[in-house]
Image (cartoon, coloured by chain):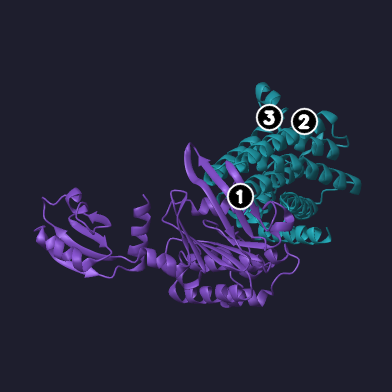
């Protein structure tokens, strides 16, 4: 089957800096695909190129088998972009109706208000909504045309917990109806809950690619953190066998390791100056940070 | 195709609704011209003529033009800039609405709004002062000001293409007030020093007023005025579409 999205060695250079570097991707129809990476990794640039908002410096991008700038392709997609405000002097329902008018077979207004939890705000001016509500309006607009491919660029930024819950439930039901969903986030947990494939990128390059459980397996490390003595240098700690990663904020040091039991024994053996020692499983976030650091 | 027309019409209706709800627009394009008209026709000696045209109809034309120009510069230009700055245009680019439809609906909506301004100012100010003009003169002068409005929409598009939305607000206000005063919409240019009169002749504000003044004085708009307005419109459109293309090509 033809992939919905196809990137072939795509690069994007901004002012002499490579934001995306030789990226190749294929997203099959009906999958929930997450692009994961820290801020500035090139996620938004990649999505913008897939959507035809940016032109790649090099390489080929195909969306639904065509050019993303074609009207025929744009009918079949919807997107929640970052840093998009609302238009002023239009009510919530009027804004949604306007977007519905762009598409051949739009979803009903009432449905869109329901899934964005904006039923109570339908008569309010869109510009008077809170940041989280504006994000939800953006979600309703992305869904207006009943898209086959839905792009969500850092969708939950600014949403409160209850909105997030409803948001992910709606996205999941879209996925169950066979829609292709492309999601960018810098939270592994978010991607883990919904994606069937995660591609981790950093500095514009793929550093990991797999199902959520594969990614988690790769990042399954544990963490030892402690307050280090003044004379303890990073070089010294890094040289200890079993240390796979190190991060430091002030005197507080975090070591990642595949086997923290052996490492703690080793640290004590070497008489490393440590106080307030904590050993932990390392949350998904820590693990993900470690993965990105490893790639560097 | 049919669908694109429907979408364009929906876009157009939204634009009109937004303009009508915009307080800045209502103040600058409707209240101020009418208020100025009553102030300056009430306090001044009404027997005065300007270049052979009675003061009251003369000033009605000035203020109608002032309102139409204000609509473009105080609400149209900042809105374009704001929609670009806030990512709205980026979002529209991924919808099936053709960018041509978006531009067209904006212009059509503004053109419709301009008709409303002209009719409103004519009716409220003109009729209440009992201005007696043949119907054909009312229609022709209104039409002339309406056509002149397109040059200012083009100017607004150019100003609106600047990246900084706040700067657009300030610049368009300076252009609006500056050109209105210098073009003789507030006070006739015949009260100006010679140099200022010569400068005024090249301003689009003066040219919009002049055609309408000629009409209410029993004459006709001259082709020089038409040519100057058309040239301005063309230049503004060319430069602004060049700038916008360049900004989008990233």
Q: Which residue lies at the image location 81% right of the left edge and 58% below the top edge?
A: B5
Work out whether A112 lies above or below A254. Answer: below
Total labels drawn = 3
Q: Which residue is mark 2?
A: B228
Q: Which residue is mark 3?
A: B191
B181 or B25: nearer the eye? B25
- Judged left or right of residue B188, residue A210 is left
Depth check, mark 3 against mark 2: the one in front is: 2
Query: Which of the 4 quarters of the picture holds residue A111?
Result: bottom right
Give the chain of mark 3.
B
Give the chain of mark 2.
B
Kindly state the secondary structure of the residue where label 3 is placed: helix
Percent x, y of residue B161: 62, 42
User: Label 2 crowding class (10 Å Cα cut-off): few <14, some 14-19, many 20+?
Assistant: some
Percent x, y of residue A187: 42, 64
Q: The chain drawn cyan is chain what?
A: B
Q: Which residue lies at the image location 81% right of the left edge and 36% below the top edge?
A: B211
């Amino acid at each position: 089957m033809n992939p919905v999205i196809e990137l072939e060695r795509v690069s994007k250079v901004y002012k002499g800096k490579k934001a995306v570097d030789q990226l190749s991707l294929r997203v099959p129809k009906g999958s929930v695909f997450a692009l994961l990476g820290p801020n500035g990794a090139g996620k938004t640039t990649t999505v913008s190129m897939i959507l035809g908002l940016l032109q790649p410096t090099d390489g080929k991008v195909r969306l639904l088998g065509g050019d993303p700038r074609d009207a025929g392709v744009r009918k079949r997609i919807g997107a929640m972009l970052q840093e998009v405000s609302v238009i002023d002097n239009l009510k919530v329902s009027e804004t949604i109706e306007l977007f519905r008018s762009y598409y051949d077979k739009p979803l009903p207004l009432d449905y869109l208000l329901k899934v964005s939890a904006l039923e109570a705000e339908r008569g309010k001016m869109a510009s008077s909504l809170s940041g989280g509500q504006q994000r939800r309006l953006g979600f309703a607009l992305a869904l207006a045309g009943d898209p086959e491919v839905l792009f969500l660029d850092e969708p939950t930024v600014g949403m409160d917990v209850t909105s997030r819950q409803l948001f992910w439930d709606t996205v999941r039901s879209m996925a169950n109806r066979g829609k292709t969903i492309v999601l960018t986030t810098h939270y592994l947990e978010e991607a883990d809950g919904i994606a069937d494939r995660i591609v981790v990128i950093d500095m514009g390059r793929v550093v990991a690619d797999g199902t959520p459980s594969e990614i988690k397996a790769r990042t399954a490390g544990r963490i030892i953190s402690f307050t280090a003595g003044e004379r303890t240098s990073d070089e010294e700690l890094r040289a200890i066998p079993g240390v796979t990663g190190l991060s430091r904020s002030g005197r507080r040091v975090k070591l990642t390791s595949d086997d923290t039991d052996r490492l703690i024994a080793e640290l004590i053996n070497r008489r490393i100056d440590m106080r307030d020692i904590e050993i932990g499983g390392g949350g998904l976030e820590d693990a993900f940070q470690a993965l990105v650091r490893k790639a560097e | 195709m049919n669908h694109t027309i429907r979408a364009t019409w929906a876009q157009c209706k939204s634009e009109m609704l937004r303009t009508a709800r915009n307080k800045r627009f209502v103040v600058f394009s409707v209240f101020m011209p009418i208020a100025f008209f009553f102030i300056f026709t009430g306090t001044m000696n009404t027997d005065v003529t300007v270049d052979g045209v009675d003061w009251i109809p003369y000033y009605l034309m000035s203020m109608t033009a002032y309102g139409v120009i204000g609509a473009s510069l105080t609400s149209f230009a900042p809105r374009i800039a704001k929609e670009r700055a806030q990512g709205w245009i980026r979002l529209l680019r991924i919808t099936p609405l053709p960018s041509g439809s978006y531009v067209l609906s904006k212009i059509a909506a503004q053109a419709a709004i301009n008709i409303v301004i002209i009719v409103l100012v004519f009716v409220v100010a003109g009729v209440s002062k009992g201005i007696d003009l043949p119907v054909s003169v009312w229609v022709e002068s209104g039409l002339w000001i309406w056509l002149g409005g397109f040059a200012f929409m083009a100017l607004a598009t150019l100003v609106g293409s600047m990246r900084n939305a706040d700067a657009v607000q300030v610049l368009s206000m300076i252009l609006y007030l500056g050109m209105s005063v210098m073009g003789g919409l507030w006070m006739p240019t015949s009260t100006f020093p010679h140099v200022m009169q010569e400068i005024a002749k090249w301003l689009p504000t003066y040219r919009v007023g002049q055609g309408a003044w000629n009409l209410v004085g029993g004459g006709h708009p001259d082709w020089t005025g038409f040519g100057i307005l058309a040239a301005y419109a063309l230049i503004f459109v060319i430069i602004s579409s060049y700038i916008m293309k360049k900004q989008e090509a990233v």
